[in-house]
Amino acid sequence: MNLYLSSLSLDDAEQLFAFEKDNKNFFERFVPPRPDSYFRFEDFSEILEELLEEQGDRRSLFYLIKDGNGQIIGRMNLVDIDWVTKSGKIGYRVGQQFTGKGAAVKGLQLLISEAKKMNLKELHAKTTKDNLPSQKVLDRCLFQKETEEICDFICYKLAL
């Protein structure tokens, strides 16, 4: 599967909204649900603008995983970037029809490559204890489990 990362932009609003709506029930099996307002386009657009403001300030960077036809198949986020300690937190999600095909691993490898280009030195991630697919993705990308578990989450770290 030929995949690439694309920086989030307003041009992606409609396709991203459809992606999120189409995968809502699937995502909620693994992660806490988004508020109902997230699934009203007007509210979604406002949220998107806030994300783009964060991206403009380089506090967070948001990417879409796209296939060779430009279709959104997932998201990769690098948030809470600390440019002093050169660290950030990652998050990701892949649409249901693309799971089990290596899309999350490939997307995360691409995000790690971007983080290295920005001279980041450490990435952090967390996943729910019952989200085994996400844990496998982090393991395949060489993230190490941290010893402390927080509530229902397992924390991971990757030194770059």
Image (tube, grey):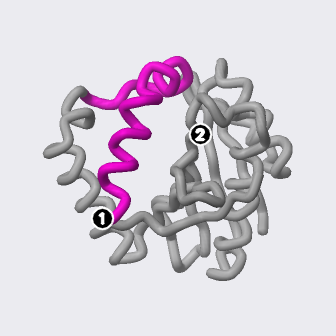
Q: Which amino acid does label 2 sit on?
A: Val
Compared to residue 61, the image places residue 27 above or below, namely above
Q: Distance between the residues labelled 1 and 2?
A: 20 Å
As helix, strand or loop, the secondary structure at mark 2 comes to strand
Q: In which quarter of the image is the C terminus?
A: bottom right
The residue to which callout 2 is attached is 94
Question: Which residue is rendered at x = 54% and y = 79% of the image?
Answer: 84
Compared to residue 108, the image places residue 100 above or below, namely above
As helix, strand or loop, the secondary structure at mark 1 comes to helix
Magenta-colored segment: predominant secondary structure: helix
Question: Which residue is rendered at x = 53% and y = 67% of the image?
Answer: 6
Q: In the image, residue 80 lies at what x, y percent? A: 46, 61
Query: For residue 133: magenta?
Result: no
Q: Earlier in the sequence, mark 1 or mark 2?
A: 1
Q: In the image, residue 146 lies at what x, y percent? A: 74, 42
Q: Residue 10 carries which label?
A: 1
Compared across the picture, whether 111 is left or right of 135 comes to left
Judge by depth and name the residue closer to the eye, 134 or 67.
67
Q: Residue 70 carries which label?
A: none
Q: Which amino acid does label 1 sit on?
A: Leu
Compared across the picture, whether 56 is left or right of 5 comes to left
Compared to residue 37, the image places residue 158 above or below, namely below
